[in-house]
Amino acid sequence: MHYALMRDSFEAPRVNRNGKIVASGMHNLAMWRCMKALREFDFHEIQRAASVGNVQVALLTAKMYVNLLAKTGYLREVRPRGPNYPTRYRLVRDSGARPPAIT
């Protein structure tokens, strides 16, 4: 059996068990860049800022990513959640250009 490289890329493709490409990883990259650019934010602001062009981030995706980064120490809470507003965060652990992977 022989294999040929069809497309070379900086990022490895994300595939499911059947080998079908399921996501390009652009959502996390877009959110990560927004977190680095904004001084303080909540998951609503990250979702809106990261949803540009072909990349449309779902609100639940932004909420989960922000919460996981907060739990792992990348984000620090600057204002706790209230009855009418979500928790606000600040990026405190910048690991570079590539976003932390949630595995």
Image (spheres, helix red, strand yellow):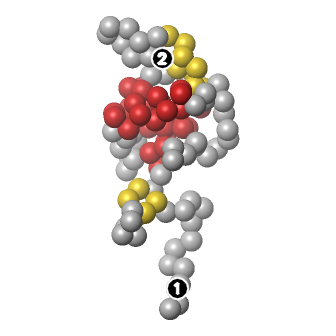
Residue 49: assigned label = none
- Picture quadrant where residue 36 is located: top right
Q: Locate residue 21 relative to residue 36 in the image: left or right.
A: left
Q: Position of residue 77 (x, y in %)?
A: 54, 16
Q: Is residue 35 visible?
A: no
Query: Who's the residue at 64% across and 44% down the image?
Result: 97
Q: Quadrant location of residue 39?
A: top right
The residue under label 1 is 3
Q: Amino acid at mark 2?
A: Arg
For this view, does 41 lie left or right of residue 98?
left
Q: Nearer the viewer, residue 82 or 7?
A: 82
77, above or below 66, in the image: above
Q: Residue at x 49, y 22 (%)?
A: 41
Q: Which mark is residue 88?
A: 2
In the image, 24 versus 55, the foreground residue is: 24
Name the one closer to the observer, 37 or 3: 3
Instruction: Compare residues 45 and 13 and report the one nearer the observer.
Output: 13
Few, some or many residues within 10 Å of mark 1 (<14, 14–19, 20+): few
- Give the amino acid at mark 1: Tyr
